[in-house]
Amino acid sequence: EPDSTKWRYLGVPYVSLPAVALVLLRNDPDYGTWAIVWVLVTVWSADTLAYFAGRTIGGPKLAPVLSPKKTWAGLGGAVVGSAFASAVFALVAGLPGLLVLSALAGALAIVEQAGDLFKSAMKRHYGVKDSGRLIPGHGGVIDRVDGLVAVATAAAIIGLLRRGIDATGAGL
């Protein structure tokens, strides 16, 4: 059917853009490794703290049709938790721009949640509950990296716009 064909074509950029983004970030000679670790800390803290805030606080649903368990409290937990984790990471690593990194991490937490919702929309479109069976009860391997896909791409775009191709990591 024609509608499913366009979704299939989305798979190419969905996989390739974040891979290119991570390479661009890592290739920064001064901040490449730090940029990659910072992106991972941002995504993991957003995902984890969204879960715990959503479960603990509950409240109104964020997007009940796409992801019935996601709440606005979870989104708030993702933003605050990611900003805090970024600040701690920047302090420990001795990175400059602690406040900018924290604010950026909070904004990218929203991107992380949007990436998660986009993956949920794809699964709903195809009537699939889980994207794999490797990790039972966790929706599959792709569900573990859906936020990373979105954040890595957004982070690389931000780094590119701020510092160019040779210093993408420093652009964060």
Image: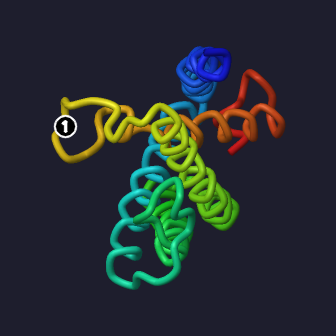
Disc 1: CA contacts within 10 A as few (<14), some (14-19) or many (>=20): few
Which quarter of the rendering shows the C terminus? top right
**What is the total number of numbered labels drawn onto the structure image?**
1
Which quadrant of the structure image shows residue 49?
bottom left
| Pointer 1 residue | 135
Seen in the picture, residue 42 relative to 130 is either above or below; the reply is: below
Seen in the picture, residue 33 relative to 17 is either above or below; the reply is: below
Residue shown at 52% from the left, 53% from the top: 66
Which quarter of the rendering shows the N terminus? top right
Residue 83 horizontal/vertical position (percent) = 55, 67
Q: Is residue 75 visible?
A: yes
Q: How is the image coloured?
A: rainbow
Residue 128 horizontal/vertical position (percent) = 38, 35
Residue shown at 46% from the left, 65% from the top: 70
Residue shown at 16% from the left, 41% from the top: 136
Using the image as rendered, state which of residue 88 and residue 118 is in the foreground.
118
Residue shown at 47% from the left, 50% from the top: 43
